[in-house]
Every structure is written in C-alpha cells, then in structure tokens.
Image (cartoon, rainbow, N blue to C red):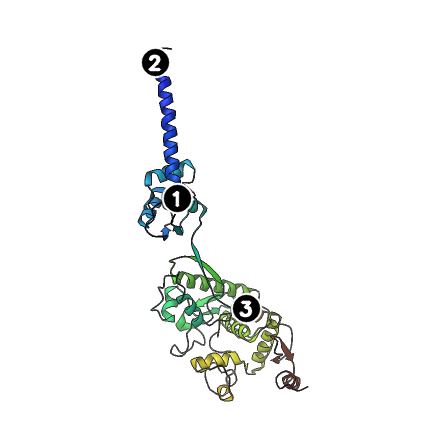
C-alpha cells in the first residue's frame, strides 16, 4: 500500500473515531441533568424567538443550557422551526434533550381559572384576585378602570337594521349610578379559562368579555320575533334574571316567557334575585317583607320593567332562553322545592300552586 493510501486510511479511521467521540460527547451532554438555579423554575419563551434566543432565555431563567450544543442538537433533530413560545416549568433532573422536547411539544405550564354561571362580577374579581398564577395588574383598578383597560363598554344598542352597536359606559341606556353598582355586571362570560403562569389578569378579563360579546351577538341574531327588548343589553339583563331564577335547565324558556309576558303588559317582574342584588351587603340570607318594600333600582316589586343592569353573569343557555322564550301565556311560577317550577296563566291557579308547594296545603 502506498504511503498516500496509508495516510488516507489513517485519516478516515481518525475521522470515524473523532465522530464517535463527538457523538458520545454530545449524547453525554444531552442526557446529563442540568444544574438548575432552583428546584423548580418557570421560564417564559417569547414568541418568534430564534433557537439561540431560546437558549439565551433559558439561561436567563436559570436553566443553564450551552447555546452552541443546544443549537446544534436542535438542528440535527430538525426541530428549529417547531419550538413554541409560552411559560414552561422545569424541575431538578431535567436534561438538555428533555428541555428541547418540552419546547418542541409546546408542553407549556398552563394554569386555569373557572368562572361559574350566576356569579356576580364582584365574585369573579375575587376569584381572579385569589389565583396565584395570574399577574394581578387590576389589583388597584376600579371596575370602570378595568373596563377601560380592556377596551370594553357597558352596553350595546341596535341600529334600525338590528345590528348590535357598542356604546360607551356614559352612553349606556339605564346606566346605574356609579356610586351604587358597577356597570361591569353581566359583561363577562362564565367559563373555564386556561393561561400561562404569569399572564396578566387583564388577559383573562379581555377574553371573557370578548366571548360574552360573541355569545350575545349570536343569540341576538337568532332571536324570536316580537320580544320586548330594544337592545342586546336588555336581553343580557333578562338572561341574568333567568340565570338566577332557575334551578332546572328545561324551565329557563318558561321563566323567560313569564318575564317577557309581564313586560308586555306592564306588570312588575317581581323577581327576588333582583331585589337581593339591590340590597347588596345588607342582605343577610333572608328576604323580608320590608326588603320587598325597600326602594332600590333593582326592586322589581315596586319598579316596573327591567332592572338597570344585569344582576349576574349568565351562561349561554340563559342567553338563548332570554331571546327564545317558550310559547306560553303564563304569567306566574312558583318553585316546587326540587329545583323545578309550576307555571300558571292566572293568579287563582298560581295561588293554589303556592298553597300546595309553599304553604304545604293540599
């Protein structure tokens, strides 16, 4: 064998050995646990980051990946375009390879907050304020300032074509006295919201507001003819009454019909939940005769028409019921005590139902 061939053969052997050593070294690096700066770390990867930018953010967050090997591993595995932004949780023992896989899978550290149908906006704020995973940017904000921060308004009007038109808080029909009750009531959709740790609570409020606007617009677009509501906001107010009055889903369209029928003939709605809402902190769990005679904007026993604002956060079923009431001439209903209600067309029939289910008379 010529000297040249011997040299080439030796070079090839060295190249293979070096490649093997590099591969072994790379494998060792990729599978060796990283020395995190804390047992558990939350690191946020920004959108549209380069691979090297991702490595830099990991290092700033206390996950010490070496940038060059990390970039090389990402390219060798063809993952450079698949790394996803978001908030990630890393724990002691994680390896560079596991970090990369987590980022490629988008295994973000999501948290959750659930807002329940029928809650007041005050109750919703308390729930979000108590969530430790949220960034509480609204902590010092009034409800009005919160609405302004998310670009919300407190009411909707309709044009002659029936298209919803958003109006500002100061333009809202039947707007309440700001010193009495907040205009934000009813404007946020009750649902479960997922978010990355450290997300601003404004983001959740903005999403819940947007979803309610969408659900309300969809229900308004498919409303029954001849309803006694001038605007989607009035329908939203009615939906909140239905939400608080019903314990059985199938009763919602019937309760809606009773209230709509009363509005048409100028009969007071006489709904206890609205009175209770108007009492505010003074309500102690018992509704007394004097409460029904107390003149607040929400006392539907002594004031005709709808209350000035919603009284709770209605769900989609109540929105649909408000805008598609059952075809009935009923004007009264009373609870059976099991969550369902008895509906009556006349006061005499209603009084007999009250005797049976409330007074215990047969």
Q: Which of label 1 and label 3 is nearer to you?
A: 1
What residue is rendered at 57% in x and 69% in y?
Answer: 323
What residue is rendered at 47% in x and 78% in y?
Answer: 277
Contact? badges 1 and 3 (CB < 8 Å): no
- The picture quadrant where one finds residue 22 is top left
Label 3: few (<14), some (14–19) or many (≥20) C-alpha neighbours in 10 Å: many
Of 55 and 174, nearer the camera is 55
If you read the primary sequence from the N terminus, does the residue marked by circle 2 or circle 1 appear first?
2
What residue is rendered at 34% in x and 12% in y?
Answer: 3
Of 190 and 153, nearer the camera is 190
Residue located beneath label 1 in the image: 95
- Whether residue 275 appears in this view of the structure is yes
- Whether residue 305 appears in this view of the structure is no
Residues under labels 3 and 2: Cα distance? 86 Å
Residue 117 lies, with reference to residue 19, above or below; the image says below
Residues under labels 2 and 1: Cα distance? 44 Å
Residue 26 in the image, given as x and y percentages of width and height: 37, 35
Residue located beneath label 2 in the image: 4
Residue 209 in the image, given as x and y percentages of width and height: 45, 64
Q: Which of label 2 and label 1 is nearer to you?
A: 1
Of 53 and 321, nearer the camera is 53
Residue 161 lies, with reference to residue 43, above or below; the image says below
* Left or right for 329, reference 12: right
Residue 13 lies, with reference to residue 48, above or below; the image says above
Residue located beneath label 3 in the image: 319
Looking at the figure, which quarter contains the N terminus? top left
Contact? badges 3 and 2 (CB < 8 Å): no
């Amino acid at each position: 064998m010529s000297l040249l061939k011997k040299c080439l053969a030796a070079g090839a052997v060295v190249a293979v050995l070096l490649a093997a050593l590099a591969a072994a070294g790379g494998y060792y690096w990729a599978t060796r646990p990283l020395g995190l700066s804390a047992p558990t770390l939350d690191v946020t990867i920004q959108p549209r980051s380069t691979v090297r930018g991702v490595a830099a953010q990991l290092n700033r967050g206390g996950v010490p990946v070496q940038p060059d090997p990390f970039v090389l591993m990402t390219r060798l595995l063809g993952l450079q375009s698949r790394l996803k932004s978001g908030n990630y949780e890393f724990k002691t023992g994680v390896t560079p390879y596991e970090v990369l896989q987590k980022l490629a899978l988008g295994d973000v550290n999501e948290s959750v907050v659930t807002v329940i149908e029928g809650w007041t906006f005050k109750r919703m704020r308390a729930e979000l304020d108590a969530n430790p995973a949220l960034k509480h940017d609204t902590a010092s904000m009034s409800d009005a300032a919160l609405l302004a921060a998310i670009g919300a308004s407190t009411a909707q009007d309709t044009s002659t074509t029936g298209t919803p038109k958003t109006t500002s808080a100061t333009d809202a029909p039947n707007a309440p006295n700001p010193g009495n009750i907040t205009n934000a009531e009813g404007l946020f959709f009750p649902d479960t919201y997922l978010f990355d740790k450290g997300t601003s609570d404004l983001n959740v409020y903005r999403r819940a507001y947007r979803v309610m606007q969408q659900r309300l617009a969809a229900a308004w677009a498919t409303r029954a003819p001849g309803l006694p509501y001038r605007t989607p906001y009035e329908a939203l107010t009615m939906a909140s009454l239905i939400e608080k009055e019903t314990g059985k889903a199938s009763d919602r369209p019937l309760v809606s019909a009773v209230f709509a029928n009363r509005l048409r003939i100028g009969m007071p709605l006489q709904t206890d939940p609205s009175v209770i809402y108007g009492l505010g902190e003074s309500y102690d769990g018992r509704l007394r005769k004097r409460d029904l005679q107390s003149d607040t904007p929400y006392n539907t026993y002594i004031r005709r028409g709808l209350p000035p604002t919603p009284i709770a956060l209605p769900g989609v079923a109540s929105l649909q019921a408000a805008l598609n009431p059952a075809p009935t001439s009923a004007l009264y209903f009373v609870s059976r005590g099991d969550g369902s209600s008895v509906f009556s067309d006349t006061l005499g029939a209603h009084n007999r139902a009250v005797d049976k289910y409330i007074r215990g008379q047969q």
